[in-house]
Amino acid sequence: MAFPRIEFNLRKMIGMQQGRERFDVLLTVILPLFLMVVSSYTNAWAFTGGHMSLTGPDASNTYVAICKGLFVEALVFCFFKLVKILCGLGRWNFVAALVPFAVGLFGVIVSSGCGVAWAAKSGEMNFLISSVSAYLSPSITGVFKAGVGMLFPVALAVLAVYDPKHMITEHIESGAELAVQALMVENAEHHHTMLREAQKEANSNPAIRESYKQMAHIGAQQMVEAVRDGDYSMGLGKATVTPGPVTAPLPQQSFQRIAPPIAIPGGVPQLNGPQQAFPNSPAMPMLGAAQQPFVNSPVMPANYPSMGNTQQLNIPVPVPASAQKPGLFDWLLAKN
């Protein structure tokens, strides 16, 4: 039995991700309406004292109570939305926002009271509350009852202040970025597929087959020479070398003679002064030891004539110490 082949490319996976994000945005957009409908039911139950009926003599009272409950929830949402708009205008508009804030807060209190009354007396939550009270303390059970009644109106006020349009904007930006990345990946996958097809077609070319044979021959010869040298890692590195600490070589000084010294017949004459060395030069006054100038100039002129017996002093440049790799602490400091 052959199973159908299922392909999950990046485009499909990103489409699934975008579909889930769009569904989340849809739930966020319709959530205020859902909260209004649910809270209007709990408000209507409290307004009618638990006597709700869509038929009979209490039907009209039930419809009126449902409309009142829906009106309270709409009041909460609209007034807190107005508070957000006035506060967003800046300056002294937040003072004007105090009035709708007070009205919306009273609406939250009324709706929360109706919800708490429904949770405590309707009987619909008896099983849940009894189950919670069996495992938790009475104080936590009281908080749970208050939370069940106050959850919907408080959540509606929060959604009025925090507009879900930010989620829509974030979804659009992330969707566009993911679409671009998916296009780049699909483009690379397409080039890889075309390259593999071209390689398969090229394998039938005798010249390319001969080139691969030469590559195999060269590779085999290199492995043989490596084994002769004691390397049995087959291209994965020297297996006979034990890694150890790397020490920089000490700088050594060397002297290299450029030209042999000139042999002077009869030896080097003893000269008593510059006048004997240069007889045609004018006489120079002799200075005492205390009056002789101190000359310390190791730099020779560029046009100084070579005497034939100069020697070059070769001092190698010291090997710089290897830069130490930054550790985790250095990386954290660089990030900060």
Image (tube, rainbow, N blue to C red):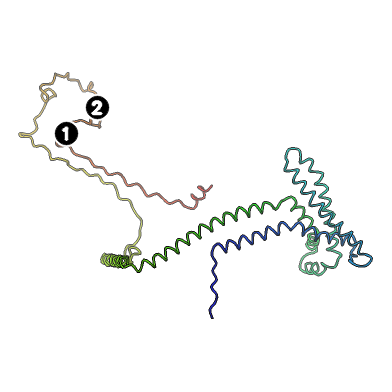
The secondary structure type at the circle numbered 2 is: loop
Disc 1 designates what residue? Answer: 306
Q: Amino acid at mark 2?
A: Val
Point 71% across, 59% down: residue: 27
- Gap between marks 2 and 1 measured at Cα: 21 Å
Tell me how many marks there are.
2
Q: Position of residue 81 (x, y in %)?
A: 76, 49
Q: Are marks 2 and 1 in contact (CB under 8 Å)?
A: no
Q: For residue 296, which quarter of the picture? A: top left
Q: For residue 306, which quarter of the picture? A: top left
Point 14% across, 36% down: residue: 308
Q: Amino acid at mark 1?
A: Ser
Point 49% across, 50% down: residue: 331
Q: How would you rate the neighbour count of disc 2 (Cα within 10 Å): few for under 14, some for 14-19, many for 20 or more?
A: few
Placement of the N terminus among the 4 image quadrants: bottom right
Q: Is residue 90 above or below residue 162?
A: above
| Comes first in the chain, label 2 or label 1 | 2
Q: Is residue 7 above or below residue 301?
A: below
Q: Nearer the viewer, residue 151 or 42?
A: 42
> Which tag is nearer the camera, tag 2 or tag 1?
1
Q: Position of residue 229 (x, y in %)?
A: 26, 64
Disc 2 designates what residue? Answer: 295
